[in-house]
Image (cartoon, rainbow, N blue to C red):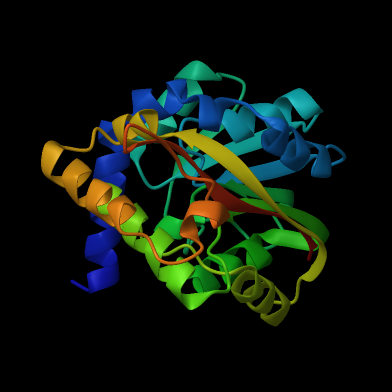
């Protein structure tokens, strides 16, 4: 079995174990970013939400007026949670890099705060391009790394220590390149910061003590510029919050 297959199975199992936490997570279940992605797809009739997690984005698409919404995820427990919480959406268990739908099946696709877990982002982009009809919309959001190499290394180290299923937060330029190579026209890119409560961020993945210590060690010795770039706050020397960078991107097939 390939390393990528092993990684995908591990990620699906991990997310399945924490489906309820993601359903209840304030970062995932609401926000101006979620509203914006849904608004980009409001005129669509058929949409797929790739790596749906607990189904918040799929539900937002329904709320925006999309007639048929498929919530797709590699973790059966996530799909079950999504369809139980939001019975108006359909659920499909599938690999984000090998979507099992016919070509031109949808006129919109979303993917929100998930792609940093994908081993092959270009394959994901190609899969979305195949199932979107010409003129279809991709509304995408994910954590991104700064262009500075040291800051890039820091945030990816922190994320992997917290959650071993994290593959990589890529740069904005990486995503634009992959999308354009797959035939998309990138209409909008916007990088926003979202402040995360440090302990809640760790609790979402139920990080054990050893992992928490390794994350704390990384925050204890950040590279130059990290405190400002990630808006790290501390109380009595302990990290209480930080901001991660998220790319919101709208593209047309």
Rendered location of residue 225, percent (x, y)? 51, 63
Residue at image point 30% right, 59% down: 221
Residue 242, relative to residue 252: is it above or below? above
The answer, for residue 217, to whether it is visible in the render is yes
Corner quadrant of residue 31: top right
Q: How many marks?
A: 0
The answer, for residue 165, to whether it is visible in the render is no
The C terminus lies in quadrant: bottom right
The N terminus lies in quadrant: bottom left
Rendered location of residue 70, percent (x, y)? 59, 38
Residue 37, relative to residue 61: is it above or below? below
Residue at image point 78% right, 54% down: 137
Q: Residue furthest left?
A: 210
Rendered location of residue 100, percent (x, y)? 50, 56
Residue at image point 79% right, 43% down: 41
Left or right: residue 223 versus residue 251 is left
Q: Viewer-proximal residue, 194 or 70? A: 194
Residue at image point 56% right, 66% down: 146
Residue 142, relative to residue 71: is it above or below? below
Corner quadrant of residue 86: top right
Q: Viewer-proximal residue, 146 or 106? A: 146
Left or right: residue 171 versus residue 183 is left
Left or right: residue 65 versus residue 56 is right
Q: Residue furthest bottom?
A: 181
Rendered location of residue 42, percent (x, y)? 83, 37
Q: Viewer-proximal residue, 34 or 242? A: 242
Left or right: residue 147 versus residue 237 is right
């Amino acid at each position: 079995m390939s390393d990528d297959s092993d990684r995908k199975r591990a990620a699906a199992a991990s997310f399945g174990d924490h489906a309820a936490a993601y359903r209840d997570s304030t970062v995932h279940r609401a926000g101006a970013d979620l509203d914006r992605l849904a608004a980009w797809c409001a005129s669509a009739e058929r949409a797929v939400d790739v790596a749906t997690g607990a189904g918040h984005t799929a539900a937002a698409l329904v709320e925006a007026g999309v007639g048929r919404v498929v919530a797709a995820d590699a973790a059966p427990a996530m799909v079950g949670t999504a369809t139980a919480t939001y019975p108006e959406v359909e659920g499909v268990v599938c690999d984000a890099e090998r979507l099992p739908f016919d070509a031109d099946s949808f006129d919109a696709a979303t993917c929100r705060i998930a792609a940093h877990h994908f081993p092959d982002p270009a394959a994901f982009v190609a899969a979305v391009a195949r199932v979107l009809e010409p003129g279809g919309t991709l509304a995408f959001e994910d954590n991104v790394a700064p262009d500075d190499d040291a800051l890039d290394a820091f945030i990816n180290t922190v994320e992997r220590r917290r959650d071993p299923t994290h593959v990589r937060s890529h740069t904005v330029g990486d995503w634009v390149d992959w999308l354009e190579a797959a035939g998309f026209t990138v209409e909008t890119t916007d990088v926003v910061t979202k402040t995360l409560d440090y302990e809640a961020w760790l609790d979402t993945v139920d990080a054990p003590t050893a992992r928490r210590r390794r994350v704390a060690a990384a925050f204890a010795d950040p590279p130059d510029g990290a405190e400002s770039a990630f808006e790290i706050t501390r109380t009595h020397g302990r990290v209480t919050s930080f901001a991660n960078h998220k790319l919101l991107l709208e593209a047309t097939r």
